[in-house]
C-alpha cells in the first residue's frame, strides 16, 4: 500500500505563495506515489481545493474548534472546514498543546467535533524531553491516546491516523532511533488493542513526524508497522518535499 505522506505547512505561506508552490509541485507529482495529505493554513484551503480538483490528494486543516455555531470570536468550526473542502484536520499537535495549552480533554472534544462533521483526524501524540529522560515515553503515549479517544466507537478509528511526533524531535533536527520508533509503534498499537480490539490495533494507521528531511527520509520508509510520515519544515520547499515523497515510495 502507498505510504501516507503529510505536509504540515504550519503558519507558513500566503494564499499566493501556496498557489505558486502547488502549481510547481503538481507539474512534477504523480498521484500513485503516495497517499498525500496537505495541511495548509485556513486561508490557503480554498486555492488548494481549486488546484487539486480531480487529483487524488487530500486537504487538511491545522486546527478545529470543539463546537460549531457558537459565539466564539476568531474560531473556525468543523462545519466551516468541511465546507471549504478539507477532508482531514490535525488535532493535538505539540505546538498547540504547549503554546495554546490544549489538553487531552480539549483534544478529545475536537476529535469528536471533527468526526461529527465528516472529517478524518490526524491525532498527534508524543513525549517531551523530560518524559523521555525519565523513561515516561510509553506512559505518556498511553494517556494521550486513551484520553483523546475516550468515548469513540471502534468503527470511528477508520477515520483516524495517529501521528507519533516526539516533542523534542519537532523542528529540532533530532530524530529518534529506529528502535525507539518501533517501541513507540508497538505500544501505540497495544493501547488501541486493549481499548478497542486486536483488529483495531493492527489496522490503525500510524505515521512518524519530527525533523524529517530529504537526507533522512529513507530511514523511515522501511520501518515495520509505520504507515507514513508527517513533514513540517522540509515540506515548505516543493523540490525537497518531492524528494521525501520519492524516498518513501
Ligand atoms: P518538522 O515538524 O518536520 O519541522 O520537525 C513536524 C511537525 O510539526 O509536524
Image (cartoon, rainbow, N blue to C red):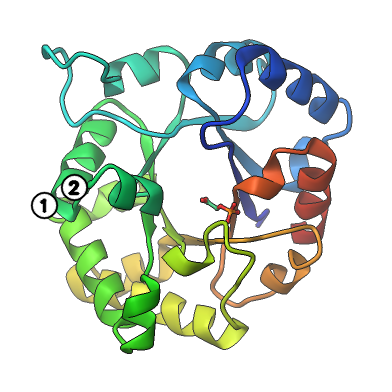
User: In the picture, residue 228 is in which quadrant?
Assistant: bottom right
Quadrant containing the N terminus is: bottom right
Q: Is residue 94 visible?
A: yes
Q: Are marks 1 and 2 in contact (CB under 8 Å)?
A: yes
Please indicate whether residue 144 sits to the left or right of residue 72 in the image: right
Name the element at disc 1: loop
192 shown above or below 39 = below
| Mark 1 → mark 2, Cα distance in angstroms | 9 Å
Kindly identify the residue that appears in the image at 19 percent across and 64 percent down: 146
Q: Quadrant of the C terminus?
A: bottom right
Q: Which residue is mark 1?
A: 151
| Viewer-side residue, 76 vs 162 | 76
| Percent position of residue 37, x then y | 58, 38
User: Circle 2 sits in a helix, a strand or a loop, which is it?
Assistant: helix
Residue 130, which numbered label?
none
Q: Residue at x 11, y 52 (%)?
A: 151
Sequence-wise, which precedes: disc 1 or disc 2?
2
Residue placed at 64% from the left, 44% from the top? 35
In x, y percent, where is residue 187?
A: 36, 80
Query: Is 81 left, or right, of 47 in this rendering?
Result: left
**Image location (x, y in percent) of residue 95:** 39, 48
Q: Is residue 72 left or right of residue 11?
A: left
- Residue 26 occupies which quadrant of the picture? top right
Write down the quadrant of residue 78 in the picture: top left
- Name the residue carrying label 2: 108
Q: Residue furthest right?
A: 28
In the image, 107 versus 207, the foreground residue is: 107
Q: CB at mark 1 closer than 8 A to ligand 1?
A: no
- Asked if one can make out residue 187 in the rendered structure from this viewpoint, the answer is no
Q: Nearer the viewer, mark 1 or mark 2?
A: 2
Amino acid at each position: 500500500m502507498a505510504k501516507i505522506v503529510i505536509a504540515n505547512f504550519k503558519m507558513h505561506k500566503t494564499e499566493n505563495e501556496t498557489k505558486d508552490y502547488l502549481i510547481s509541485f503538481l507539474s512534477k507529482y504523480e498521484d500513485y506515489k503516495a497517499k498525500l495529505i496537505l495541511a495548509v493554513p485556513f486561508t490557503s484551503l480554498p486555492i488548494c481545493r481549486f488546484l487539486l480538483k480531480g487529483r487524488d490528494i487530500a486537504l487538511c486543516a491545522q486546527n478545529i474548534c470543539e463546537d460549531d455555531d457558537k459565539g466564539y470570536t476568531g474560531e473556525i468550526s468543523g462545519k466551516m472546514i468541511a465546507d471549504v473542502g478539507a477532508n482531514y484536520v490535525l488535532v493535538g499537535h505539540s505546538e498547540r498543546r504547549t503554546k495554546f495549552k490544549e489538553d487531552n480533554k480539549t483534544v478529545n472534544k475536537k476529535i469528536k467535533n471533527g468526526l461529527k462533521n465528516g472529517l478524518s483526524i490526524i491525532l498527534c501524540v508524543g513525549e517531551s524531553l523530560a518524559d523521555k529522560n525519565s523513561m515516561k515515553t510509553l506512559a505518556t503515549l498511553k494517556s494521550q491516546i486513551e484520553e483523546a479517544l475516550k468515548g469513540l466507537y471502534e468503527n470511528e478509528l477508520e477515520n483516524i491516523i495517529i501521528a507519533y511526533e516526539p516533542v523534542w524531535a519537532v523542528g529540532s533536527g533530532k530524530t529518534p532511533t529506529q528502535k525507539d520508533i518501533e517501541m513507540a509503534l508497538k505500544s501505540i498499537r497495544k493501547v488501541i488493542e486493549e481499548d478497542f480490539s486486536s483488529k483495531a490495533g493492527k489496522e490503525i494507521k500510524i505515521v512518524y513526524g519530527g525533523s524529517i528531511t530529504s537526507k533522512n527520509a529513507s530511514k523511515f520508509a522501511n520501518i515495520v508497522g509505520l504507515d507514513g510520515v508527517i513533514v513540517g519544515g522540509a515540506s515548505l520547499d516543493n523540490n525537497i518535499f518531492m524528494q521525501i515523497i520519492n524516498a518513501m515510495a
